[in-house]
């Protein structure tokens, strides 16, 4: 591993609470960079991530559903409120994307009604 890559990885981790604030795929990118597993395209993505972190990293939306984010253990949040959990190994499948889109739709409906958004209201008490 190059010293520059290691320095960049350390800076990314420092800016993101030791990676806790990184999206899981971004933390994996940092891991692969440190271990020397990236090709040119991967290194370009790593460099872009470093640049984003230096400017103020913003976690990407989970499956491009606005206001949904996911953490490393697989908990999904709507505007910081935990609303679902996915097994990390299956969080990025086509099926989970459809599920995340439905989850976002439900959260928007509840928010529009002024109702509480929670795991219970979005999943357990949702009328089918």
Image: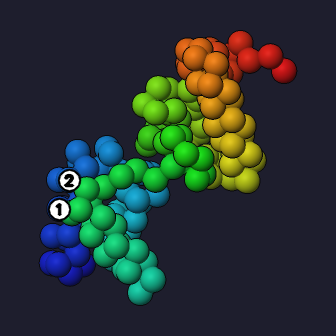
Element marked by disc 1: helix
Residue 97 located left or right of residue 84: right
User: Which residue in the protein does label 1 denote?
Assistant: 11
Callouts 2 and 1 close, C-beta under 8 Å: yes
Element marked by disc 2: helix
Please, which residue is most extreme toward the bottom here? 40
Residue drawn at x 57%, y 32% is 85
Give x and y (percent) for residue 17. 23, 45
Closest to the observer: 46 or 67? Answer: 67
Residue 127 located left or right of residue 21: right
Q: Quadrant of residue 28?
A: bottom left
Residue drawn at x 68%, y 21% is 123
Residue 53 located left or right of residue 27: left
* Number of numbered discs on residues: 2
Q: Quadrant of residue 20?
A: top left
Instruction: Quadrant for the N terminus, please.
Output: bottom left
Crowding near the residue tagged with mark 2, few <14, some 14–19, many ≥20 C-alpha atoms within 10 Å: some
Closest to the observer: 67 or 33? Answer: 67
Q: CA distance from mark 2 to mark 1?
A: 6 Å
Instruction: Quadrant for the C terminus, please.
Output: top right
Q: Is residue 22 above or below residue 47?
A: above
Please, which residue is most extreme toward the right here? 128
Q: Is residue 101 above or below residue 45?
A: above
Residue 23 located left or right of residue 125: left
Give x and y (percent) for residue 48. 34, 73
Q: For residue 35, say whether it is visible.
A: no
On residue 128, the disc is: none
Give x and y (percent) for residue 127. 80, 16
User: Which residue in the protein does label 2 denote?
Assistant: 15
Residue drawn at x 58%, y 17% is 114
Give x and y (percent) for residue 25. 46, 57
């Amino acid at each position: 591993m190059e010293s520059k890559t290691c320095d960049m990885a350390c800076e990314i981790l420092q800016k993101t609470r030791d990676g806790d604030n990184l999206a899981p795929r971004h933390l994996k990118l940092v891991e692969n960079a440190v271990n020397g597993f990236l090709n040119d395209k991967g290194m370009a993505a790593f460099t872009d991530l470093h640049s984003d972190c230096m400017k103020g990293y913003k976690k990407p939306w989970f499956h491009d559903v606005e206001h949904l984010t996911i953490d490393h253990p697989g908990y999904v949040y709507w505007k910081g409120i935990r609303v679902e959990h996915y097994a990390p190994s299956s969080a990025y499948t086509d099926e989970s994307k459809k599920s995340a889109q439905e989850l976002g739709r439900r959260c928007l409906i509840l928010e529009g009604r002024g109702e509480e958004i929670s795991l219970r209201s979005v999943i357990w008490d949702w009328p089918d």
